[in-house]
Amino acid sequence: MSQTEKKLFCFGYGYTCDYLSFALEQEGGWSIAGTTRDPEKRNLMRSHGVKSFLFDTAHPLDDPQYFLKDVTHLLISIPPGDEGGLVFNLHAAEILKIPTIEWIGYLSSTSVYGDRGGLWVDETSEIRPTSKRGSRRALAEQQWLSLAAQGAPVHIFRLAGIYGPGRSALDTVRAGIARRIDKTGHVFSRVHVEDIVQVLIASMHHPSPGSIYNVCDDHPGPSQELVAYACILLGMEPPPLIPFDQADMAPMARSFYEDNKRIHNDKIKESLHVHLKYPDYRSGLEACLAVEQQILSALKEAR
């Protein structure tokens, strides 16, 4: 690694990390590495120039000092379990010893705020999760912030519902599995993957160890409106409204409706000077559709 090159290591190289990696490659001067549980995904990552390693509960890094050598930026996106963060529990001691580290990011969730009856919350609001998912996130946050107290440059990013090309309401509508659930007064906060990447890169360039950021768009709204707009964009008839108390839903899906809150995102704008590309789901879905149409057009031209 050259003296000017930065090295990002992603624990849990998934959808968001893929977009982040692409953006950093465009910026130049970055080396990217990451972990996955899937051998096929590892091969795909390697074909894209990303150094990749298998990692899960049964496969910790066998030589962390070697794998994390010269790492300047570390991103953790693996969901926690009942014992908190897997990476923290297995490798916190080694992470504290990385001499080159400049920035550590932990991708958390707005589920740590719990249910607020539709009221607004910000980064100073009390953490009081009302779901198992939120409780796990809250524990993992405490773990990573304990490293910040020891001098590690840890940053916490509380993400709203992530969507983007290939992973949006457009896809569920096309697949015929989208439903419009009507729960009076209930809203969700969301964020386009490209805006998550914006926030992460802004933080990398302007580290503030110990900081916590909400990452979401400007307009929380009901899920049925999102599905209806996706149908409009696709020229399809929206599915019927189903009252929440009559909906047949899996426990995981139903749990997302237990929390009802609106998320303030002023801090990413004021502290990181981020201007959201997609401040609402309408502009975000329109951008997803445009990307998909570009890909289809390119495929047709290649034939």
Image: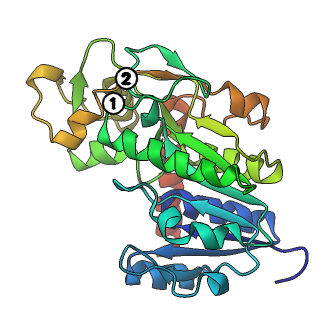
- Measured along the vertical axis of the image, is residue 245 above or below residue 29? above
Task: Write down the residue under mark 1.
Answer: 130
**How far across and how far down the image is residue 23, in percent?**
69, 60
Residue 20 in the figure: left or right of residue 40: right
**Amino acid carrying mark 2 in the image:** Asp
Q: How is the image coloured?
A: rainbow
| Depth check, front residue: 126 or 78 | 126
**How far across and how far down the image is residue 154, in percent?**
68, 52
In the rendered image, which quarter is residue 245 located in? top left
- Measured along the vertical axis of the image, is residue 194 above or below residue 272? below
Residue 249 in the figure: left or right of residue 81: left
Residue located 39% across and 84% down the image? 39
Q: Earlier in the sequence, mark 1 or mark 2?
A: 2
**Amino acid carrying mark 1 in the image:** Thr
Task: Write down the residue under mark 2.
Answer: 115
Residue 204 in the figure: left or right of residue 213: right
Separation (CA) of disc 1 from disc 2:
6 Å
**Disc 1 residue crowd, few under 14, some 14–19, many 20+, Cα 10 Å:** some
